[in-house]
């Protein structure tokens, strides 16, 4: 796939692009996706010119004049401020994905929580995440700032559009800035939903039939997914995950994906109030009959106080 030049109505003036870059920065900052001077984003102006954010500035404070232009090796071509040090990761993506025109790297807290725990985002749960993100892989941690960060994306760059960076953050890439930004919003919203669902103690997974239907719909819209072959066949769909294994303890083994017919609430392993009361009052050498008698006494007392 060769790099495609924009022409006619697709072409946006550099001034307008700089304005859009600042607007995206404000939206990232307002959403709380980056603290201090964290994060960076870029746009491919032409085959070998990339517009990018500078280092050392809040993404909420960007002005068009602050932006820089670099070549595909990261050499700064214009701009009074120094380019972001993480541009090398962006360049790795541009070099490997001629269809990509925008890259956004940020540290959205909920998605970054998964990156910090080393837990991949699970699949087969939320239609929005399946359609707009697909599988979100996790790149291994490296010290940010040099070419190694980009190289950690090598196994995933061809198939993914959103990658979690181990112990670091997230990177999203797409055909334009707006679409890349939406991916950033969606990955953090999805991670947040999962964390809230974990607090509720139960996560329902989509069944294989529901997943097949969803991926078929995605193909119909012309959206590619590494789990769907060009002729529309679904392959390599695995829905188990470390995250699911941690939710409520039993969801991973009793979930719908495993038994097919749906599940009821996870059985309580906690002793009832009566069992606790009996245990507390029973001397060790009591027989079963004595316990029955004791239960009767407690029940009678409860009934008496209730009247
Ligand atoms: Zn970073």
Image: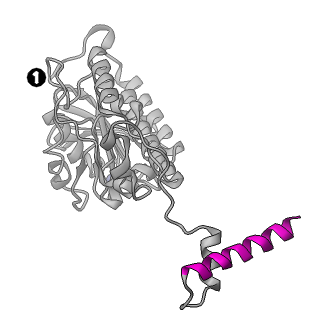
Which residue is depicted at the point 38% across and 53% down? 112
Task: Depth check: give the residue in front, 109 or 246.
Answer: 246
- Image coordinates of residue 108 in percent, x first then y, are 43, 49
In-image side of 85 versus 4 (left or right):
right
Task: Depth check: give the residue in front, 147 or 18.
Answer: 147
Q: In this orientation, does residue 79 appear?
A: no
- Image coordinates of residue 94 in percent, x first then y, are 19, 35
Q: In this orientation, does residue 217 appear?
A: yes
Residue at disc 1, secondary structure: loop
On-image quarter of the N terminus:
top left
Q: Against 161, is 224 above or below?
A: above
- Image coordinates of residue 30 in percent, x first then y, are 54, 43
Q: Which residue is mark 1?
A: 1
Residue 291 in magenta?
yes
> How many C-alpha atoms fall within 10 Å of the one at disc 1: few (<14), some, or many (≥20)?
few
Which residue is depicted at the point 34% across and 27% down? 210
Q: Quadrant of residue 141?
A: bottom left
Q: Residue furthest top?
A: 8
> Which residues fall within the magenta stretch?
288-307
- Image coordinates of residue 288 in percent, x first then y, are 55, 79
Q: Residue furthest left?
A: 1
Q: Quadrant of residue 74?
A: top left
On-image quarter of the C terminus:
bottom right
Q: Label 1 CB, ligand 1: below 8 Å?
A: no
Residue 49 in magenta?
no
Which residue is depicted at the point 79% across and 70% down? 302
Q: Against 206, is 248 above or below?
A: below
Task: Depth check: give the residue in front, 243 or 180.
Answer: 243
Q: Against 176, is 206 above or below?
A: below
């Amino acid at each position: 796939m060769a790099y495609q030049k924009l022409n006619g109505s697709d072409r946006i003036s550099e001034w307008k692009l700089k304005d859009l870059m600042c607007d995206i920065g404000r939206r990232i900052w307002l959403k709380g996706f980056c603290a201090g001077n964290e994060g960076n984003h870029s746009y491919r102006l032409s085959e070998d010119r990339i517009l990018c954010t500078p280092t050392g500035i809040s993404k909420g404070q960007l002005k068009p004049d602050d932006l820089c232009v670099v070549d595909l090796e990261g050499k700064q071509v214009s701009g009074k401020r120094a380019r972001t040090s993480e541009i090398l990761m962006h360049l790795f993506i541009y070099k490997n994905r001629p269809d990509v025109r925008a890259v956004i790297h940020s540290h959205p807290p909920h998605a970054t929580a998964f990156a910090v725990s080393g837990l991949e985002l699970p699949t087969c749960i939320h239609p929005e995440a399946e359609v707009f993100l697909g599988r979100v892989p996790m790149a291994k941690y490296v010290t940010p700032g040099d070419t190694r960060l980009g190289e950690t994306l090598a196994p995933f760059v061809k198939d993914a559009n959103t990658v979690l960076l181990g112990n670091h953050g997230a990177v999203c890439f797409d055909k334009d800035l707006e679409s890349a930004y939406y991916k950033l919003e969606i990955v953090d919203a999805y991670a947040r939903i999962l964390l809230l669902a974990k607090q509720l103690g139960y996560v329902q997974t989509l069944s294989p039939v529901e997943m097949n239907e969803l991926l078929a719909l995605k193909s119909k819209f012309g959206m590619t997914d590494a789990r769907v072959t060009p002729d529309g066949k679904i392959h390599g769909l695995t829905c188990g995950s470390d995250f699911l294994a941690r939710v409520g303890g039993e969801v991973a083994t009793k979930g719908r994906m495993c038994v097919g017919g749906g599940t009821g609430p996870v059985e309580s392993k906690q002793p009832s109030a009566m069992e606790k009361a009996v245990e507390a009052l029973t001397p060790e050498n009591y027989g079963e009959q004595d316990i029955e008698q004791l239960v009767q006494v407690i029940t009678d007392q409860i009934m008496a106080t209730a009247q």
